[in-house]
Image (cartoon, helix red, strand yellow):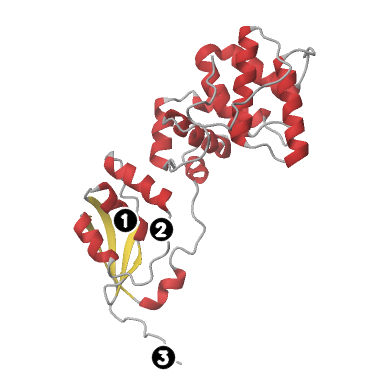
Amino acid sequence: MAAREQHVTTPPTVEIVEVSPALAESWLQKNPNNRNLRRPVVDSYARDMESGNWALNGETIKLDVHGRLLDGQHRLSAVIQADATVPMIVVRGMSSDVMPTVDAGAKRSYSDALKLAGEDNTSTLAAVCRRAVMWERGMRTNTGAIKPTPTEMSDFIERHPEVRTSAELAARLASRESLPASVYGLCHFLMAKLDAEQATWFLTRVSDGENLGAQDPIKHLRDRITRLRVRGGRINETVGLALTIRAWNAHRSGQARAKLQLPAGGLTNENFPLPK
């Protein structure tokens, strides 16, 4: 059995380095055991770099005593993709046998970051912001390459502080028998732009089902949700969002619909219903 590498006696060095695409490429070439790249992660980092929102947040690029890359593959790949030079904290001279411990802790979620910032309803607010950023970028179906970054979501809250109200309502209305909190929250955020009081009333009725006539679009929506849950257990967020918008539009126009039709062939970003 090969002897385990001895721990280095010289302590690692730490410095802030302006990492260019060329430097990133040279470090990546010194990583013989690359993980499979998670492309959405690289894309999200690159967007922050391109927009000038890349933050020096304490995370480090780690190089061992031989100059091999231990940690930072996704960030360095994003530097190349964005064709940007950004500051990063670089730790050099680490022992190679620490690799199993790198990135092994629990990753902080955006919900955790919101809690540290003193926000309320953090899980729901994070979920609503994620969908709202995607919606703003034209991604209606919760699929595709866009993975909103914490910086993008925080910027969204700063530009749209009213999303906190939508998240608070969603946290109260969501349940296993109804719609996910992200759907309630995004729907309220979008519908409140048209009529805030009506949006709250409508979504509350979707949740509690009170005082609904046989031809009420809200009743048809609740019946459809029930059928979907019986069949699959958990309603798909994209389908739930589209059906709720369809019911809202029917309610606003005074229509009574026996069915809430979705586009033949499935939902796409192009044919997704928009609140009216």
Picture layout, residue 114 above or below residue 243: below
The reply, left or right, for residue 86 in relation to residue 189 is left
Give the quadrant of residue 191: top right
* Residue with the most extreme bottom position: 1
Disc sitting over residue 77 in the figure: 1
* Residue with the most extreme top position: 254
Between disc 3 and disc 2, whose residue precedes?
A: 3
Q: How many marks?
A: 3
The amino acid on which the numbered mark 3 sits, given as a three-letter code, is Ala
In percent of width and height, residue 212 lies at 77, 14
In percent of width and height, residue 128 lies at 53, 33
Task: Name the element at disc 1.
Answer: helix
**Mark pair 3, 1: CA separation:** 33 Å
Q: Residue at x 70, y 40 (%)?
A: 234
The amino acid on which the numbered mark 1 sits, given as a three-letter code, is Ser
Label 1 crowding class (10 Å Cα cut-off): few <14, some 14-19, many 20+? many
The reply, left or right, for residue 45 in relation to residue 232 is left
**Mark pair 1, 2: CA separation:** 9 Å
Q: Quadrant of the C terminus?
A: top right
Q: Is residue 169 visible?
A: no
Proximity of marks 1 and 2: CB atoms separated by less than 8 Å: yes
Camera-nearest residue between 231 and 30: 231
Disc sitting over residue 3 in the figure: 3
Which residue position holds label 2?
37
Q: Nearer the viewer, mark 3 or mark 1?
A: 1
Between disc 3 and disc 1, whose residue precedes?
A: 3
In percent of width and height, residue 73 lies at 35, 60
Q: Residue at x 43, y 67 (%)?
A: 102
